[in-house]
Image: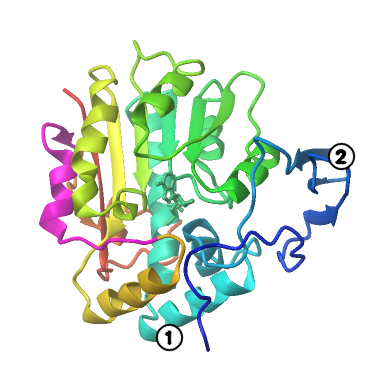
Amino acid sequence: MPMASALPRMIDTNRRDINSHRCHILRISTPGARLMISIGTADRRTTVTDGPGSPAIDSSASHSARVWNYLLGGKDNYAVDREAGEMIMRMFPDIARIARQQRRFLVRAVRYLTAEAGVRQFLDIGTGLPTADNTHQVAQRVAPESRIVYVDNDPLVLVHARVLLTSTPEGRTDYVEADVRDTDTILAAARSTLDFDRPVALMMLGILGQLRDEEDPWAVLARLLDALPPGSYLAVSDGTDTSEALVRAIEIYNANSASSYHLRAPEALARFFEGLELVDPGVVTIPRWRPDVADAEGSPRAVDAICGVGRKP
Ligand SMILES: C[S@@+](CC[C@H](N)C(=O)[O-])C[C@H]1O[C@@H](n2cnc3c(N)ncnc32)[C@H](O)[C@@H]1O
C-alpha cells in the first residue's frame, strides 16, 4: 500500500474522513474563517474556527498522535495514519501491544504518584489524543483536587482536548499547545495552573523519542526538571532499539511521515533519570513496572519499550 508522500504538507481543510462520531467538519465561507470544526455531544459542544491563530489540521501525511490513536484502536485518525499504523503492525506486530502497555503504565504511574507519593499536580507533555483513562481522570479519581496541564503540538489534539479534557470541580485541567523543545513557553503557561513551589509530576510518555539525539532530549528534559521543586517526579516511557524489525519499521515510518520517532538503547533512555531517585523497580520493560491484577496483559513478557519513575531529591 503506498504511503503518503512526505513534506511539504498540503493542508486539506475539507477532509471528512476523520473517523469519529464526535466530529463534524463543515466548510464555511466568511472571510478569515474557512473551516469550522464542531466537536461534541448534544450536551457539550465546542467550536474551533480555522481563522488566524487557529489550528490547521494536516491530513495529507501521517502524524504521531493520530497513528498512536490508530494503534490504540481509536477512531480519531485519517487514512494516511491508518496506512502508517498498518505498515508498522505488518513489520512489527507487537507495536499495538506496546501502545496499550504504555497507556497501562500511565494509569499505574499516575495512581502511584497520587495515592502513594501524594502528588497533586501533573505536567503531561505529548498528551496524545484523549482516550480512556487520561492523566486527569486517573489522578482525580484518587484526589479530585489534582491539577493537570496537558501539552501537545498537534492541532487535532488541541481540538479534542478543548472538549474532552474536563476536570472535577475541585481540580483543574488546562491545555497548552506547544512544542516540547519550547520549554520556556511550556513552563510559563503551566505556572498559571500549577504551583511550582509544590511537587509536580512530569509525564513524558512517548515524547522524548520524538526528538533526535542532535536535539539533545536530555537537555530539554533537564530544563523542565530544573524548574520543578524537590519532591517532584518524572515518568518516562519510550521505545527501545532492541528489535531489528521495529528499527526497520520506524525507519520507513520516519521517511514517510510528517513526524519522526527515534528508538534508543535502554541505557540511553535510563540516562533521562540521571540525578533522580528511581522508584522501585527502576527502569524496566513496561509490563514489569508495578503490574497489577487489572492488567489483562500483566504477564511479564518483555516488550521493546521501557519505562520508569524517578523522584527529584
Ligand atoms: C506516541 S504519542 C504518545 C501519547 C501519550 N503520551 C501516550 O503515552 O499515549 C506522542 C505524542 O507526542 C506529541 N508530539 C510529538 N512531537 C511533539 C513535539 N515536538 N512537541 C509536543 N508534542 C509532540 C504527538 O502529537 C503525540 O500526541
Question: Is residue 164 positioned above or below 115 on the image?
Answer: below
* Residue annotated with mark 1: 90
Callout 2 secondary element:
loop
Residue 190 at x, y percent in the picture: 46, 23
**Does residue 132 appear left or right of residue 247 in this picture?**
right
> Type of residue at label 1?
Arg
**Does residue 19 appear left or right of residue 286 in this picture?**
right
Q: Which of marks 1 and 2 is in front?
A: 1
Question: Is residue 245 positioned above or below 277 on the image?
Answer: below
The mark nearer the N terminus, 1 or 2, is: 2
On whether residue 291 falls in the magenta region, the answer is: no
Residue 58 at x, y percent in the picture: 60, 58
| Residue segment shown in magenta | 260-278
Question: Is residue 272 positioned above or below 266 on the image?
Answer: above
Callout 1 secondary element:
helix
* Residue annotated with mark 2: 43
Q: Residue placed at 37% from the left, 76% from the top?
A: 94
Badge 1: residue crowd in 10 Å (few <14, some 14–19, many ≥20): few
Q: Residue placed at 49% from the left, 44% from the top?
A: 153
Residue 295 at x, y percent in the picture: 42, 59
- Is residue 36 or residue 203 the one in the foreground? 36
Check whether the beta carbons of the residues at disc 1 and disc 2 lie within 8 A of each other. Answer: no
**Does residue 155 appear left or right of residue 224 in this picture?**
right
